[in-house]
Amino acid sequence: MSLLIIQIPCFNEEETLPATLADLPKQIDGVDRIEILIIDDGSSDRTIEVAQEHGVHHLVKFPANRGLAAAFRAGIDACLRLGADYIDNTDGDNQYNGANIPALVEPVVAGRADVAIGDRKTSSIAHFSWAKKRLQVLGSWVVRQFSGTTVVDTTSGFRCWSREAARRLNLVNPFTYTLESIIQTGHDKLTIESVPITTNEKLRESRLFKSVRSYVTRSAGVILRSYLLYKPFRTFMTLGAATFGLGVLGLLRFLYFYLFTASSAGHVQSVILSGAFLVIGVQLGMMAMVADLISANRKLAEEMLVRLRRLEAATPDREQDRPTITLNEPKALPEPRDA
């Protein structure tokens, strides 16, 4: 029997969670069972009570707020240990229309894609300002270049993963999972499909960032850091080659004046600057070699993580430093299943 778990990260969503839960589908073609998992990120309101009153199947609770990225990672980890074949992520603020979940899940269930991402068609969202719409388009283009994917709406959190694709998620940044996961998925050569979706009326302001400028700055850092994790050799070797080339050009300039003009006076600075560029270029080349070795070790660590998650699929989490999974109806975790 195939299991879809819909995970919903929440932080003080007492007012919006009922509408979100009421919007979720009860049946989906190709899926035998649907369960709901709430990740409570240290809420101070009645989010947990509301979730329990609405009969959610699973609850992951953090004692204090740790941010969206941490909540998302905890949810994925819990879904895998609960035996999910497919994992759908939506927001607790009812931003995404739950009626679109069957369409979002369909390419993953059908086996056409490892990951499906909802395309909100941001240019048509009424409450997005002109500047925000343009930034969404530009930001998505940048992420596509860095990830080698064709994802249309890269900041959409409305997504579905197959079990194997979820096992390969290894996110490290504390800000947001949306951009880093696309870059990682693209470099892992997994298939991503964009699915057109609709959004609901805005119920509250975003809590992820205080201003557009803050979001752009932090997102740029996430993109650059994520790309460096997967393409360190290319990045540092390109920078090293460019810097070394500048050094060679400066040296050739000095030699031209020295050999073909009456005097080389006044061009000694070219030699000094060229020497600096040559040294920096060589150093960047050495950094590229070291970074490539570190990248190889990271790949081995990621494969070990995938194997560990397979082993944990049927083992209850007993570690004290992880959030506790509370079930409305106590039941044994399923036996591990091969992909």
Image: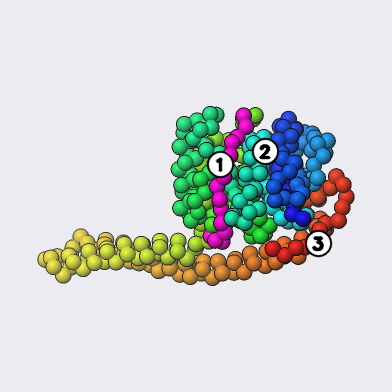
Looking at the rendering, which quadrant does residue 51 occupy? top right
Looking at the image, is mark 3 or mark 2 earlier in the sequence? 2
Which is more N-terminal, label 1 or label 3? 1
Other residues around mark 2 within 10 Å, as few (<14) / some (14–19) / many (≥20): many
Disc 2 on helix, strand or loop?
helix
Residue 163's spot in the image, x, y percent? 68, 57
Q: Earlier in the sequence, mark 2 or mark 1?
A: 2
Query: Does 200 appear in magenta?
Result: yes
Query: Horizontal and vertical percent for residue 328?
Result: 85, 45
Q: Which mark is residue 196?
A: 1
Q: Which residue appears at 47% of the width and 39% of the height?
A: 135
Q: Is residue 320 visible?
A: yes
Q: In the rendered image of this protein, does residue 15 appear above or below residue 156? A: above
Would you say the residues marked 2 and 1 are in contact, meaning their CB atoms lie under 8 Å apart? no
Q: Return the residue at label 2.
A: 98
The amino acid type found where label 1 is placed reads Pro
- Helix, strand or loop at disc 3? loop
Residue at image position (36%, 62%) is: 242
Using residue 118 as the reference point, say whether residue 123 is left or right of it: left
Residue 335's disc is 3
**Based on the displayed image, in which of its 4 quarters is residue 238 positioned?**
bottom left
Tell me which residue sits at (47%, 31%) in the image: 130
Q: Nearer the viewer, residue 129 or 86?
A: 86
The colour scheme used here is rainbow
Q: Are marks 3 and 2 in contact (CB under 8 Å)?
A: no
Left or right side of 310 for 334: right
Residue stretch in magenta: 187-201
Q: Select label 3 or label 1 by which is in front.
A: 1
Main SS of the magenta part reads loop
Q: What amino acid type should be assigned to the residue bearing mark 3?
A: Glu
